[in-house]
Image: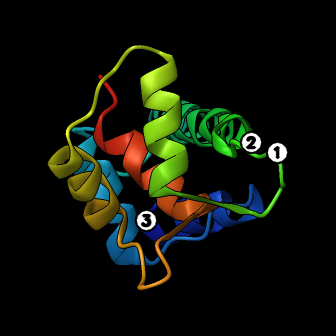
Amino acid sequence: LGKAEFQQGLSLLGFEFTITQVQELLDELGIDAMEGLGYNEFEQVMTHKLDNRQRHEAILDTMPLFDMGCRDRGYITEEDLKAVADMIGDRLKPEELQQMMAYAGVDKTGQVNSEDFVKIFRKYEP
């Protein structure tokens, strides 16, 4: 397969990539596409992408646990994040919380939406 066919195959499976993004993904995985892409390369990319998707979904599944009032608002606040950290014995300094919020790109409302929430957790993944 060439990169264009590879891109189409990914698209059929629900992964939308530009040709540049396909090349970046191949580079990230150390796959040389100069001679074409075979089944083994496709399997390697899919395993990587599915693992990422499953981790993403698992992180999202934990978000309601951080909504301390069980309000199902679709976002959490810095106060929610601090309360959970305190409950599990992780005494975060105010600066650490502010760094997490800043990394997530939280807007002026101070709300962490689901994508921001994933960004926070992915940054601190082992």
Determine the residue positioned at 51% across, 20% down. Answer: 87
Q: Secondary structure at mark 2?
A: helix
Circles 2 and 1 in contact, beta carbons < 8 Å: yes
Tell me the crowding category of disc 1: few under 14, some 14 to 19, or many 20 or more residues within 10 angstroms, Cα based: few
Q: Is residue 113 visible?
A: yes
Of labels 2 and 3, earlier in sequence is 3
Q: Is residue 1 visible?
A: no
Disc 3 target residue:
3
Disc 2 target residue:
64
Image position, residue 113 (x, y; %): 59, 66
Quarter holding residue 14: bottom right
Disc 1 target residue:
70
Determine whether, in the image, residue 15 is placed left or right of residue 61: left
Circles 1 and 3 in contact, beta carbons < 8 Å: no
Q: Is residue 26 above or below residue 106?
A: above
Image position, residue 5 (x, y; %): 57, 66
Determine the residue positioned at 60% across, 37% down. Answer: 59
- Identify residue type, mark 2: Pro
Tell me the crowding category of disc 2: few under 14, some 14 to 19, or many 20 or more residues within 10 angstroms, Cα based: some
Q: Secondary structure at mark 3?
A: helix
Quarter holding residue 6: bottom right
Cα distance in 3D space between marks 2 and 1: 7 Å
In which quadrant will I find the C terminus?
A: top left
Image position, residue 37 (x, y; %): 43, 47
Of labels 2 and 1, earlier in sequence is 2
Of labels 1 and 3, earlier in sequence is 3
- Identify residue type, mark 3: Lys
- Identify residue type, mark 1: Cys
